[in-house]
Image: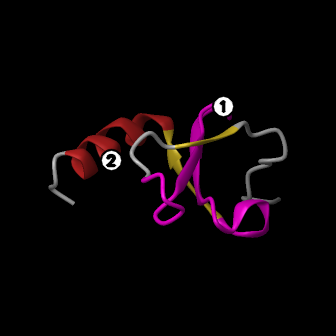
């Protein structure tokens, strides 16, 4: 049994918090059931993605946004 999620149909988008100069670019896909995959846009489909449970994504993003992480 594989624990790697199938991300072949993931609809990736650049985070609104990424800068626009080609530097720190984070992509997320919010169309995958139960998880939110996150990857570095510079590596795209060739690079790894980390996944968060949907329930954990909002608190994680909020913590990043308010500087507690």
Q: Secondary structure at mark 1?
A: loop
Q: Which residue is mark 1?
A: 33
Relative side of 22 to 45, left or right: left
Q: Is residue 46 left or right of residue 30?
A: right
Quarter of the figure with the C terminus: bottom left
Q: Position of residue 61 (x, y in %)?
A: 33, 44
Magenta segment: does it hold 12? no
Q: Please, is residue 32 above or below residue 46 in the view?
A: above
Q: Which tag, 2 or 1, sits closer to the chain's start?
A: 1
Q: What residue do we see at 24% from left, 46% from top?
A: 65
The image quadrant that residue 55 belongs to is top left
Quadrant of the rendered image containing residue 28: top right
* Residue at mark 2: 60
Cα distance between the residues tagged 2 and 1: 18 Å
Q: Position of residue 17 (x, y in %)?
A: 39, 45
Camera-near label (2 vs 1) is 2
> Which residue lies at the image location 16% right of the left edge and 46% below the top edge?
66
Quadrant of image for the N terminus: bottom right
The kind of secondary structure element at disc 2 is: helix
Q: Which residues lie in the magenta part?
A: 19-48
Residue 16 is left or right of residue 3, and the answer is left
Q: Nearer the viewer, residue 62 or 15?
A: 15
Q: From the viewer's perspective, tell me whether residue 16 is left or right of residue 48.
A: left
> How busy is the neighbourhood of tag 1: few (under 14 within 10 Å), some, or many (20 plus)?
few
């Amino acid at each position: 049994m594989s624990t790697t999620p199938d991300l072949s149909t993931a609809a990736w988008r650049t985070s609104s918090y990424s800068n626009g100069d080609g530097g720190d670019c984070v992509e997320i896909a919010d169309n995958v059931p139960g998880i939110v995959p996150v990857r570095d846009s510079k590596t795209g489909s060739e690079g790894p993605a980390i996944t968060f449970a949907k329930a954990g994504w909002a608190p994680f993003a909020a913590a990043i946004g308010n500087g507690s992480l």
